[in-house]
Image (cartoon, grey):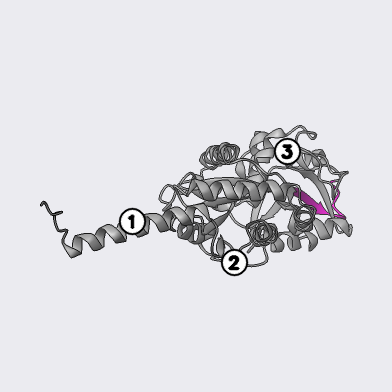
Amino acid sequence: MRFAKKIPLATAFKVILSSSIALSASLSAQTYPNKPITIVVPFGAGGDADQSARNLATVAQNVLKQSIVIVNKGGASGAIGSQFVKDAAPDGYTLLLARVGSQAVLPAMKNDLSYKWNDFTFIGLLELNPVVCVVNAESPYKTFEDLTKAITAQPGKLNYSSSGPGTILNFGPQLILQTLKLKPEAAVNVSYKGGSEAVVAVLAKEVDFSCGNLTSALTQISSGKLRALVVTTPERVKEIPTVPTAKEVGMPQLEAIVGWSALYGPPKMSPDAINKWTEVLAVADKDANWQAGNVRYGGIPRIMSPSDTERFAASQYVSYTRLSTQLGIK
């Protein structure tokens, strides 16, 4: 009679453990999500990024039947939170609320940044945040053409508020000057702490104009304290329908200067998790509450597929790389 060969106890334990892990991973993939999901916002609470994340979370919780936890990890212009997500497990439970500043502008400007623009899994674009150029309501510049003619006629006399070199608020005016074939100093940059302060500077007549996110200026535009001259989105903005687009004022190049939010994951994220979030975004795109949430913080819904989102992000990275190099701020 032949007997089966005895397997050492340690080896048998390893086989059982490996099989259990494989089975657990398989079940986890099939049941994603089976625990709360964290969306990291790489900026402080209350801003465009934070509002976008919370607006998405409301829809996602209903679809996924799991809690969505919003965590603000600000610092280093969004680099700290972005790096945190890049280093996270690719299981779909730690995601990033990506923004133009942290995912396109920063990688374009800093060669020594710890991550590249495409070091993430692209899940979907969420919305565009129009950039609007404004002047004080009492300004003599009634139109965008009035403003550009004044800058051209008197280089170095007019000034604008921004949140510092290499930010969206600085890139807009600099691209205007470049398109007009003027030197970077043809309009003088005056730096403030952020977009809200930049708007206040226009209200206080400390500067002649500013180009920043619509969110920061919409209330003052609606109340008649600021005059909007142009928006950078391809179509007019519903909240300010009389304000022309960049293309309409003859400067389509300005469409590159636009805020946006997207949902990213760590590199090599689980395909099951990607597919599940694609379903969530498809539901959000038709959800009246999500649409209304965008309106509240000046967002224009623009859901894109993972592949279209990657192409969009690539075009943004290329635009800011070219611009930052030409302006000498790379």
Q: Earlier in the sequence, mark 3 or mark 1?
A: 1
Of the numbered discs 2 and 3, the one sitting upstream in the chain is 2
Q: Which residue is mark 3?
A: 152
- At label 1, which amino acid type do we have? Ser
- Please tell me which residue is depicted at 73% across the width and 34% down the height of the picture: 251
Q: Which mark is residue 69?
A: 2
Mark 3 surroundings: few (<14), some (14-19) or many (≥20) residues within 10 A: some
How many numbered badges does the structure rendering display? 3
Q: Nearer the viewer, mark 3 or mark 1?
A: 1
In the rendered structure, are the residues bearing label 1 and label 2 in contact, judged by CB atoms less than 8 Å apart? no
Give, as a three-letter code, the residue at label 2: Val
- Which element type, helix, strand or loop, lies under badge 1? helix
- From the image, state whether disc 1 or disc 2 is nearer to you: 1
Which residue is nearer to you in this view: 81 or 63? 63
Q: CA distance from mark 2 to mark 3?
A: 50 Å
Nearer-N-terminus badge (1/2): 1
Considering depth in this image, is 172 or 22 the residue closer to the camera?
22
Horizontal side of residue 9 vs 260, given as left or right: left
Residue 157 image point, x, y percent: 71, 48
Question: Residue 166, can we see it?
Answer: no
Q: From the viewer's perspective, is the residue at label 2 or at label 3 nearer? A: 2
Q: Which mark is residue 19?
A: 1
The x, y position of residue 329, in whole percent, is 51, 46
Q: Which residues are magenta?
A: 131-141
